[in-house]
Amino acid sequence: MEIRNATARFSALALAIASTACAARAQEPASPKPPQPPAPAVQAIEERAATQPLIEKQREIVREQLRDKQRSALDSRMQAEVGRVQAELARAHGDIKSKEVQFNSIFQNIRMSPDQSSIITTETMDAAAQKELREDLAVMDRLVRDEVTRAGADAPSAMGIKITMLGQGAPMYVEGAGAVFSATVNWPLAAAGASAGKKDDRPRDPESKWEIAKREIAGSNLPRRGKPGEPFEPPVFDQARLDALRNNLLTVLPEATNIRHLKPNESVIVTVQGVDEAGYSVRMTLKAAKADVDAAAAGKLSSADFAQRVAQRIG
């Protein structure tokens, strides 16, 4: 009985406590709600969020425009630099051409100057005759040199200026012999071994210092192949070029009929200095009698017959 009464009192007490707690909770103030932004601020946030992609796109467009301007400026600088280099090349090319013109002008003045001609005679010759002979020697010298240059038109060039004839041997008249014209070419007039069989036939080591120096002296005016300091190596002998040179000279020799004061018993001699493939000195000489020159010029001798009468030697 007592236990039942205690349980009842405990239950009543717990119910009273719970009721009191509920009443106290009910009397507490409610938690405040977070403040809400005013309507215009919310609209601004929403508009900013909506326009952000457009802003980024505009920024990308501006950045691309800046890159285009930078590329355009770089292209302009590159074009300006290319133009400057081209102008420098054109100026250098013009300088080379100018020097070539000056060289040709000087060379032609040298070969055309009658004062360069030599007259060797023991007979008395008045001033007027000497002047006429020198003028004729200068004209014939130019014709000979033109043919020599034409025959070597494909010879090597240096610094853009083609040089196929070297040396400035003046034409001369030698009493009893006739008129002599000389030139030096920068290409071989014979194959290797053309100088064999000369006075000194002693066998020598081709790589000895003596032979190397001999070849270098013989070819000192000729173009080299290979690097500086390497052994002398002249261009390869071309038989067709040699034949063209010989034919050109045979064709122009009849023009010597116009040389005044050349006696009937005298001759016209053309000699061309060169080397063979080994670098040894070689000379080609043509000698035509004045009578044959006159006959060829008058058409009394055919080209073939005239060529047969012209004395020729290479060696």
Image (cartoon, rainbow, N blue to C red):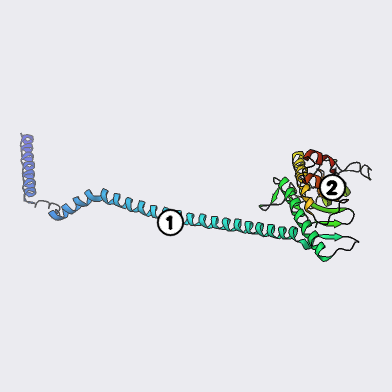
Q: Is residue 303 left or right of residue 5?
A: right
Q: Residue furthest bottom?
A: 127
The amino acid on which the numbered mark 1 sits, given as a three-letter code, is: Ala
Could you tell me if the residues under marks 1 and 2 are in contact, i.e. CB atoms within 8 Å?
Answer: no
Please tell me which residue is depicted at 29% across the width and 49% down the height of the picture. Answer: 57
Along the polypeptide, which appears first: circle 1 or circle 2? 1
Badge 2 local density, few (<14 within 10 Å), some, or many (20+)?
Answer: some
**Which sits in the foreground, 307 or 192?**
307
Q: Nearer the viewer, mark 1 or mark 2?
A: 2
Q: Position of residue 211 (x, y in %)?
A: 87, 47
- Label count reads 2
The amino acid on which the numbered mark 2 sits, given as a three-letter code, is: Ala
**Residue hosting label 2:** 291
Please tell me which residue is depicted at 74% across the width and 42% down the height of the picture. Answer: 244
- Tell me which corner region of the image, top left, top right, bottom left or bottom right, holds residue 203: top right
**Which sits in the foreground, 179 or 36?**
179
- What's the CA distance linking mark 1 and mark 2? 79 Å
**Which sits in the foreground, 4 or 69?**
69
Badge 1 local density, few (<14 within 10 Å), some, or many (20+)?
Answer: few
**Residue hosting label 1:** 73
Q: Quadrant of the N terminus?
A: top left
Q: Quadrant of the C terminus?
A: top right
Element carrying mark 2: helix
Q: Position of residue 11 (x, y in %)?
A: 7, 39
Q: Position of residue 101 (x, y in %)?
A: 65, 58
